[in-house]
Amino acid sequence: MPTALMRHARPPSPLAGRLAGQSLLFALGEGTFMTGSAVFFTQIVGLSAAQVGLGLTIAGAAAFLAALPMGKLVDRFGPKRMWALSATGQAAMFSFWPFITDFRGYVLMAVGMEVIGSLGGAAHGAYTIGVLPPGERVQSRAYMYSALNVGFTLGSLLGGIALAFHSNTLLHALPWFTAAVFLVNAAAIIRLPRAPHDDRTPEDRKLKVPGPGPLRNPGWLLTEFFGGVFWTNQVLLNIVIPLWLVEETDAPRVLLAFLFGTNTVMCIFLPMAAARGVRDVTTALKAIRISSSFFVVSCLITLATHDTVGWTTIALVWLGHVTVTGAELYLSAASWAFEAELMDPRQRGAYQGAGELTSTLGRVWAPAVYTFLAMNWGAAGWLVIAGIIVVATVGIHPSTRMAHRFLERHVPADVLAEARASAPEAEEGAGAGPPSLIDSEPPTAGPAR
């Protein structure tokens, strides 16, 4: 057993370990602040719950609109530079949080944070695809995903300890702690090796990126839209199943803590197992089918708990949570393969931004729709939710073929071959860096930072 744990803790490569370190740092800082953010905004800033929600909605809309422009900045100036700039900018923004005293300041800060974060998300995605050898990309991203969850868990513990003391002084310190962690992260990013796209000269940056942009690639946009639909497993995980447990079953509410603990443990220890064998579009589609099967099974198990009692209910609710976590793990592996294989290597930042646009459209409706279906239609509602996933599973197969044909028509064969079969040789600062683990979106589940 100790040997197996040590093997799991070992990164696929030294570079993957260093990238996992960035994920760990990002999640540690973000998780610490987010755990205490509701209390910080209401008790320190003095906002109402409605104001907090409205500000987050406005900030989310700003991030949505900024996604594509931020991605284009990544392509122009290089992913490593923009990733470090984003981490530094977020550190600066966090350091100003204790000085915000009204709703207007809160909205401006929240919008700034989200826009800077969208730059970091696009840069991180473009950098990791560019710098990792093709044969290691999915396994390395899985290792980073594990690290991300470790970081969020540690951050939640630190935030919870701060809340336990009921001290405004400690609450004031939360954003400063996060700012310090993000600064360390930015310094570590600078010491990472350069990705191929980081080597563009000032003259290169003045030239228009060759080829049509991602908004003209309907296959990519549809693939990312369906990906957003699949990511509604997080709505099931975090909203619908907990509401169903409380309102429609006889299971004790304390079971919720056990459910989320199970999800955390699985997302730390199982990503690399789920990603094993996923290396291209064909194997990624197989992972999508497995993910969707888990999602559908979770719906069927959960709807059955309406009529069960006692330990049977507890066991089935837990099993429903386990299966929807399985859907998350296999979907993550497939998503990383799609990103690596279906984006124009010359425009990875823009593709990341465009993908965020359509992925958001694929999932933003789910909290309201899924909650209504499950809580008002009962068993029929759960079957409709499962049917939505089945339709998306069918649809993503032709959409990936469309995206692949688009690249073959518009990207030179040698560019595609180099992106899929070669690894960068530069190892600037390769010997240094922090320890390892997973980093976003968002938060969220979703792509790792």
Image (tube, helix red, strand yellow):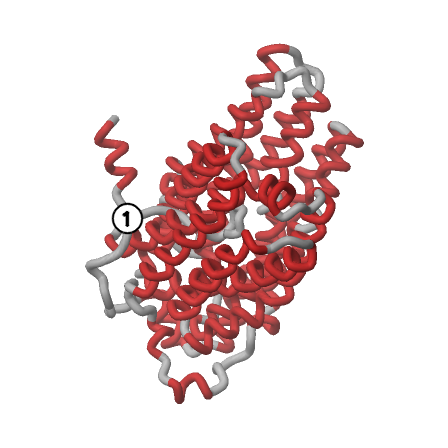
> As displayed, is residue 312 above or below residue 236?
above
In this picture, residue 182 sits left or right of residue 58? left
Residue that sits furthest to the top in the current view: 310
Q: Position of residue 294 (x, y in %)?
A: 54, 35
Q: Position of residue 407 (x, y in %)?
A: 49, 71
Q: Is residue 52 visible?
A: yes
Q: Position of residue 183 (x, y in %)?
A: 38, 58
Quarter location, residue 185: bottom left
In this picture, residue 138 sits left or right of residue 334? left
> As displayed, is residue 33 above or below residue 219?
above
- Pick the front one: 283 or 220: 220
- Amino acid bearing label 1: Pro
Element carrying mark 1: loop
Q: Which residue is mark 1?
A: 435
For label 1, the crowd category at 10 Å Cα-Cα, with few meaning under 14, some 14 to 19 and many 20 or more, is some
> As displayed, is residue 186 above or below residue 237?
below
Number of residue marks: 1
Q: Residue at x 22, y 62 (%)?
A: 430
- Pick the front one: 334 or 100: 100
Quarter location, residue 182: bottom left
Q: Is residue 287 visible?
A: no
| Placement of the N terminus among the 4 image quadrants | top left
